[in-house]
Image (cartoon, rainbow, N blue to C red):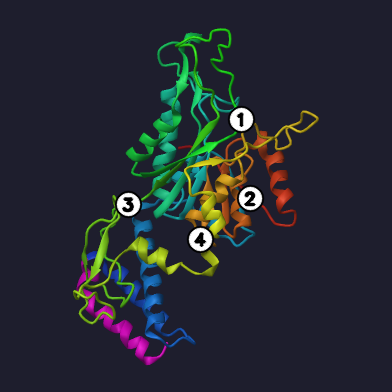
Amino acid sequence: MNTKQKNYLDEILASADDYLRSVFSCEQIEELNLRVNNLKNTPSKNNSIDYAIKEWLNLYIKFVKEVYQKNTSVSDEVLVDFINQKDDGIKIIWGNCLNVLKNLPSESLGLMVTSPPYYNAREYSHWDNLDLYLNDMRNIIREAYRVLDNHRVFVFNVGDIFDNDNLFTTSVWGKRRIPLGSYFTKIFEEEGFTFVDDFIWDKGEVQSQRQKNGNKPYPFYQYPLNCYEHILIFHKHRDDKLRYPCPICGSLQVNGNAYSEIGLKSWECKNPNCFKRSKSNRGKRFSLKSIITQGMQNQSTQISEDYIAKWRRDIVKIKPVFKINSKGENKLGHTAPFPYEIPEFAIQMFSYPGDIVFDPFGGSFTSVIAAKKLGRIGLSTEINKEMFRKSSINNIRKYFPNNKISEVDYERKQ
């Protein structure tokens, strides 16, 4: 950097000294100063102040995240090394997703997208009753909140089912419509997430023969058949009260402003020398989310108009995955794969190139395939290695025959 850029960064740090000392330890401030000095001594062809401010913003945000992670995480080096290793961006962890989540660093994932095992809907997903199932899912969602990066998104596909909750009786008369979408929405919000949207996946065909009662065309005998599922969108906004630099001038002379969403704190620049002020002489108003999202608006992240139009309505027609071929064979080797369009939508709308996209219930690894195709890092866990590994790896190979698939066996008793 040139002398002008270095002096400007020195001014930012000097004006923020009292605040930094009030929130960080002496060792942490020493580390921050070291990183700033390294930044100042890094050669650059861009000699503008704007460039220096942008690099300072990135440095500070990364530093704050690392401090938070050290204060909140007990991460496993085996997992951290596996996730950070340079490979082809296809990462499979064989093991219990809850055990894996508990050992991941806090706020280390850019996006989560999944379809969970539905309550007692498949031979590999059975619980004694609905409460035990929902409690297991709650524990996973609680850890998901911790490991998902702040101001990021969890896309959750689930369908309502017809079954016995086994809470009152195990008799056949105990079967009923179980609104899993509603139960999961409540759990997500209780664990800190904010509900944003519910896209209805119109599957275009009946998935159940429940209550046809064709021989009783009378009132109280007719019920609709299940031909849709939910694609639920949740935001994570952990209430972070640390100050962040003004994206215009880089100053930490900011005051808290109103919350723009639940848990999303915004700030107003109070630097009298800021380069941009309103007509009423007010400073820039911003949040950490706005710094990140506005700073990532470029040609590589732009979404096509046609794709946006496809998801403009919250009822979307997507054909279910046809897994049985003409010979009656399951060509995917998995009894409940979800369509590529769902992780594709999540990745296009709620992540950036290079982000880690995590699916805790890997199955046939559709999310990993979509992440790789869209320039992200696909990471997934799957507990049923013996049941699904061969078919699922073959499924990935159909799309990426020459790419390396990184795998690790991971089981830890909790």
Residue at the location (61% across, 33% down)? 336
Q: CA distance from mark 4 to mark 3?
A: 20 Å
Circle nearer the N terminus (1, 4): 1
216 sits to left or right of 53: right
Q: Which residues are magenta?
A: 1-22
Give amino acid for label 3.
Arg
Between 285 and 26, the one nearer to me in the picture: 285
The residue tagged 1 is 205
Frontmost of labels 1 and 3 is 1
Q: Earlier in the sequence, mark 2 or mark 1?
A: 1
Mark 2 vs mark 3, CA separation in Å: 30 Å
Question: What is the three-letter code of the residue carrying label 2?
Answer: Ile
- Mark 2 or 1: in front is 1
Q: Of the residues shown, which amino acid type is indicated by label 4?
A: Tyr
Do the CB atoms of the residues marked 4 and 2 lie less than 8 Å apart?
Answer: no
Q: CA distance from mark 4 to mark 2?
A: 16 Å
The residue where tag 3 is placed is 238
Q: Secondary structure at mark 1?
A: loop
In the image, residue 358 above or below residue 250: above
Under circle 3, the secondary element is loop
Q: Quadrant of the N terminus?
A: bottom left
Question: x, y percentage for residue 214?
Answer: 58, 11
* Residue at numbered disc 2: 369
Residue 119 in the image: above or below residue 76: above
